[in-house]
Amino acid sequence: MRLASEISVRPVVVNDDQPPLSEVCVNAVATGQRVDGAVLEAAVECNGRYLLFLTDDVPAEDQLSIHLVDRDGRLLDSARIGAMYSTGSFSSLTFREPNAAAFRFIGDADWVVRVFDQPRWQMPFVAEPRGVSRPWRWRRWFRVEGRPSPGP
């Protein structure tokens, strides 16, 4: 794993009532792939794929979107950390072997994203930590781990 400077995002114009979107760029070339989030906090290369961490840039209710894209910028998997009226600050990104990135975000928690070599079967709506939401799918390219503290 390494920080990937060849990946960037550019904002997509959306209506005020829509969540922020960005277009993935590889080597400054737009891919056409849109992902949730406004600010690219980090892009990490992992075995020829890229793990993207984007926040919404909403101070009172910031959420973190995590996306895995292939070398051409096509979306493989996504997850989102956050909840209404809660906020976090993405920090302390470190790499753990094999294929894991650790960071701090919401809920005074240490979070870990483990990237798989191949997609794995996972029952939807099961085994996600509190505060994590994902699109409904049977297969996952990564797992999100964390134990956020309960709210006040």
Image (spheres, rainbow, N blue to C red):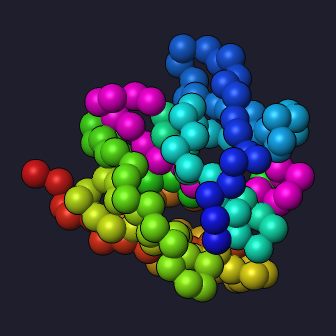
Q: Residue at x 39, y 67 (%)?
A: 111
Q: Position of residue 3 (x, y in %)?
A: 62, 58
The residue most toward the left is 152
Residue shown at 76%/56% (left/top)?
Answer: 69
Q: Is residue 89 left or right of residue 108?
A: right
**For residue 63: magenta?**
yes
Up-down relation of residue 25 to residue 53 (above or below)? above
What's the residue at 17%, 54% (across, down)?
151
Count of numbered marks: 0
Residue 55 as seen in the image, left or right of residue 75:
left
Which x, y percent locates residue 91? 37, 53
Viewport quadrant of the N terminus: bottom right
Residue 134, by quadrant, is bottom right
Q: Is 91 located above or below residue 140 in the figure?
A: above
Q: Which residues are magenta?
A: 57-74
Image vertical order of residue 138 relative to residue 50, above or below: below
Quarter assignment of residue 130: bottom left
Residue 81 or residue 8, whichever sits in front? 8
Specify whether 65 is left or right of 73: left
The correct choice, above or below, for 137 with respect to 82 in the image is: below
- The percent coordinates of residue 44 (x first, y second) are 64, 59
Q: Main secondary structure of the magenta part?
A: loop
Q: How far across and down, in percent of the image, does residue 67 sit? A: 65, 54
Q: Residue at x 70, y 70 (%)?
A: 46
Q: Is residue 112 magenta?
A: no
